[in-house]
Amino acid sequence: MKKRAQARIQRVVTRSGAVMIFALIALLVTSIMIGSLLKIAAMSHRQLKRDEYRLQASFLADAASERALVRLQTDPRFLGDKWLVPAEQLAPGRTATVRTSVTPDPLNPNRQIIEVMAEYPVRHPDFVRITRQLHSH
């Protein structure tokens, strides 16, 4: 009788050990999957922010290009400027710098080359720089 009881206890302990190992493996696999999902979510969020910065810098460069064209119509001697866009006009805590330069076109003396460079957000590790070049008439 004692041997039967000991054998029965041994089977229960062996099954409990196997269940425990299975549970630990399942917990490990689940933890790895959750960690991977969190990493993917963080990378997606960072990429979304970069896309947002790129789009905003592109809008600023386009606006500066239009601004330079209008300015050249009223002042043909306009050589460029630096435009500091405050956070109040953008996202909170995010500023931008836009530089415009106007130079004579070496191939056509009646035209000028307008170069625009927009940086957004200023002093941020993931800032974006967009440049545009166009010709005035």
Image (cartoon, helix red, strand yellow):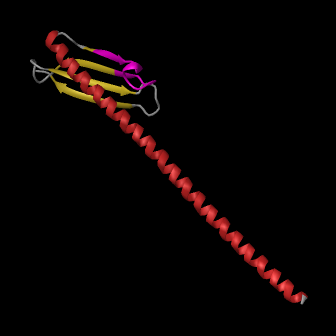
Q: Residue at x 18, y 26 (%)?
A: 134
Residue 122: where, in percent of width, then height?
Answer: 42, 25
Whether residue 125 sits left or right of residue 28 in the image: it is left
Reply above or below: 79 against 28. Answer: above
Whether residue 21 sits left or right of residue 37 in the image: it is right
Q: Residue at x 85, y 88 (%)?
A: 4
Query: Splitting the image into 4 quarters, where does residue 133 fall?
Result: top left
Residue 74: where, in percent of width, then height?
Answer: 15, 10
Reply above or below: 34 against 70. Answer: below
- The quarter of the rendered structure image containing the N terminus is bottom right
Tell how many labels. Answer: 0
Considering every residue shown, the one lying at the far right of the view is 2
Query: Splitting the image into 4 quarters, where does residue 23 fall?
Result: bottom right
Residue 45: where, in percent of width, then height?
Answer: 45, 42
**Closest to the observer, 50 or 133:** 50
* Magenta region includes residue 129: no
Whether residue 94 sits left or right of residue 56 in the image: it is right
Q: Residue at x 31, y 20 (%)?
A: 99
Magenta stretch bounds: 81-97
Query: Splitting the image into 4 quarters, where does residue 26 fall?
Result: bottom right
- The quarter of the rendered structure image containing the C terminus is top left
Q: Residue at x 21, y 18 (%)?
A: 68
Residue 17: where, in percent of width, then height?
Answer: 74, 73
**Closest to the observer, 45 or 121:** 45
* Magenta region includes residue 89: yes
